Structure formats: C-alpha cells, structure tokens
Image (spheres, helix red, strand yellow):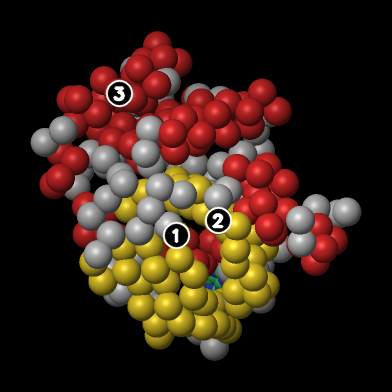
Amino acid sequence: MLDVRDLDLFYGDAQALAGVSFTVPDGSITAIVGANGAGKTSLIRAIAGMEPPRAGSIRFDGHDITGKESFEICDLGLGQVAEGRQVFPTMSVQDNLELGAMVPRARKLATQSLERVWEMFPRLLERRKQLAGTLSGGEQQMLAIGRCLMGRPKMIMFDEPSLGLSPAMVHEVFAIIRRLHEDGMTVVLVEQNVAVSLHMADHACVLENGHVVMEGRGADLLGDDRVRAAYLGL
Ligand code: ATP
C-alpha cells in the first residue's frame, strides 16, 4: 500500500530523516517505534505532503506521491490523525467533520460518511452543535478520527493517538483503531505505548536518529532483546 524509499528530510541544516526505507503492507497495522526525536512525526508529515523531502520517493496505492500537495495525497485516500488532535476549536463538531470531506472524492460521499461517523461515535452526534474546543481530550481525539474518516481514506496514519488521554479513553481509541482495521483499513501507528502498538501490529519498523534500524513482524520485534531493552524497559 505504501512504499518509502531512501527518504531524506532536513530542517535547515539539521537532518531529521536519513535514507529511510520501509513498507506498509496492504491491510496491515504497521507500527513505527522510536525514542523522542527519532523522526517519527517528521516521517508521517513527509508522507502526508506536509514537509518536502530532500531526496527519496514515496509511493502510495500505485501512485508516486513524492512532493505532492497534502490535499492531493488526501484525495488519493491517505489520511492522517495528527499528534495533538488539531481540531478547529471555535467551530462546531459537525462543521469540523464536514471540513474533513473537502477533497473531491470525499465530497460526493459526505452525507453517507457523516452517518457512518455518527454511528461509530454516538457521543459526537449528541454533541454535534457543541464547539470543538469545549470537548474533552478524548472526545477531541474521536472528532479528529471522525474528521479523517470523512475524507474516505484507504489508509490512516495515527501519530500518538493515546497521548494525554485517560486509561479508559486510551482503551477506547485502540478499540476504534482495531475496528477500523477489521473493516479493511490499512493503519500506520506511531505510539509512545510501544508494547500495545507492537502487540497490535502485523508489521513494524524501528527508527533511531532518523534511520530505520529494524523492520519486521510486530511479534518478532516484541521478542527482540534490543527492542525489549530500549523501548519496553525489560
Ligand atoms: P517525539 O516522539 O518526541 O514526537 P519524533 O520521533 O516524532 O519525536 P520528530 O518530531 O520527527 O521526532 O523530530 C525529529 C527531529 O527533527 C528532532 O531532532 C526535532 O527536534 C527536529 N524537528 C522536528 N520538527 C522540526 C522543525 N519544524 N524545525 C526544526 N527541527 C525540527
């Protein structure tokens, strides 16, 4: 579904990604694991068309998306739920959701998509007129996921979806990600909760200082001594 080859990304002179290559198999949950500052968010932003890479290529669902605008990438079916949720605080829940369906392919399906989101998140339906900024953190995360679904993605990249949420909400967010995957969604998951993300993942890669140092099955990485020592504290 996604193939990243030899990606370099710089912020000024500082290199955030160096020759990053990895694949996301169709229908998989692929976890990206790494310490703070390893480059996980930079990688997601580069794939989503929000940071231009200096070198390398990105293919998604048969299309070369290297250097394309994020709007175009979104229209091809690549969605992302950014770190920190990023809802529009002074707009209503429903208006936030409708903004997610602005790309041409999704616009035609907006009414149907909204029904699906209400079915999946009844709490958002109850609060559809409420300003997004007054929702709880967990509700804002639901809204961010719902807004992404309004764009009719084939693949969703989640950046730290459980950050700052209560344990019950963390559980709910992971249940939603599992449900989306069971319904056929390809998922990329960046998560501080490495044990949970590797348990969920079919496929995973480890980033260190902007380099991919390991790629393999989630279960194999969970059993790897270096991963256990560095990320699971075992
Ligand atoms: P975290 O888990 O802490 O969010 P991360 O793995 O997502 O970390 P990135 O946010 O991608 O890491 O950061 C990779 C490197 O790039 C870091 O050294 C960071 O300081 C740097 N960096 C990220 N964004 C910018 C920016 N906009 N300008 C300059 N440097 C940046």
The front one of 227 and 223 is 223
* Type of amino acid at the residue the image marks with label 2: His
**Is 134 placed above or below 30 here?**
above
Please tell me which residue is depicted at 43% across the width and 57% down the height of the picture.
Answer: 25
Please tell me which residue is depicted at 72% across the width and 46% down the height of the picture.
Answer: 195
**Quadrant showing the N terminus:** bottom left
* Type of amino acid at the residue the image marks with label 1: Val
Q: Do the numbered discs 3 and 2 sit on residues whose CB atoms are within 8 Å?
A: no
Percent position of residue 17, x then y:
54, 77
Res. 23 image quadrant: bottom left
N-terminal of the pair, mark 3 or mark 1, is 1
Residue at mark 3 to residue at mark 1: CA–CA distance: 26 Å
The answer to whether residue 101 is left or right of residue 14 is: left
Ligand 1 falls in which quarter?
A: bottom right
* Type of amino acid at the residue the image marks with label 3: Arg
Percent position of residue 140, x then y:
49, 31
Percent position of residue 133, x then y:
47, 30
N-terminal of the pair, mark 3 or mark 2, is 3
Q: Which residue is mark 2?
A: 203
Q: Which residue is mark 3?
A: 116
Circle 1: element type: strand
Percent position of residue 104, x then y:
13, 47
Extreme-right residue of the structure: 234
**Is 174 placed above or below 45 here?**
above
| Disc 1 C-beta below 8 A from ligand 1 | no
Res. 224 image quadrant: bottom right
Q: Can residue 185 be seen at all in this image of the molecule?
A: yes
Q: Which residue is mark 1?
A: 24
The front one of 32 and 219 is 219
